[in-house]
Amino acid sequence: MLLSLDIQKKAEPIIRQTQKGFDPIISAYAQGLSENLNDLILSVEGFDNHIFALSKTAIKELLDETNKVIDVFVNIDENLMDSVDADKEIIERFKYSLKALYKLRSLLHIAYTKGVAVKETPGNIKERLSAISRASVLHNLSKHIQ
């Protein structure tokens, strides 16, 4: 059985709720947002084991969707931090959901680039980097000797 994850569908309620603003006085709002964050976190974390079973095109599509959701969530996170009224529990869950999304993105990136041929660095670039490194070490050592 192959599982799939519609990251946009999972993130949409959170995005929609946070665009309205943060109103901690309304407990239903906070509870609904908290439940949606929990659902997103569980879906993302539960999907980790199934990434490598996807096709390259499915991985690329999910990677693109995840990047879009992360961009929106980063903006929401900045607004949430600026909001004095934000519930601390929601802030923690939001940060944890961002962490889970970043982890998903890294696993998707690994799965997508797996098997891509790696070209060897040309010799002249290696020599130049080595020279820069030696010069840096000598410069730093000369500071400590004086």
Image (tube, rainbow, N blue to C red):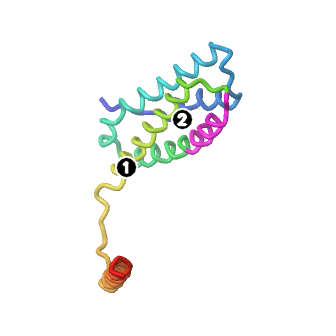
Quadrant for the C terminus in the image: bottom left
Q: Between 44 and 91, which is closer to the camera in this rendering?
A: 91
The answer to whether residue 125 is seen in the rendering is no
Disc ID at residue 56: 1
Residue found farthest to the right: 20
Magenta span contains residue 83: yes
The answer to whether residue 99 is seen in the rendering is yes
Above or below, comparing residue 112 to residue 86 in the picture? below
Q: Position of residue 44 (x, y in %)?
A: 41, 33
Q: From the image, tell me which residue sits under label 2.
A: 8
Q: Position of residue 25 (x, y in %)?
A: 68, 16
Residue found farthest to the front: 146
What is the CA distance from the residue labelled 1 to the residue labelled 2?
19 Å
Magenta extent = 71-84
Quadrant for the N terminus in the image: top left
Q: Between 37 and 58, which is closer to the camera in this rendering?
A: 37
Which kind of residue does numbered mark 2 sit on?
A: Gln
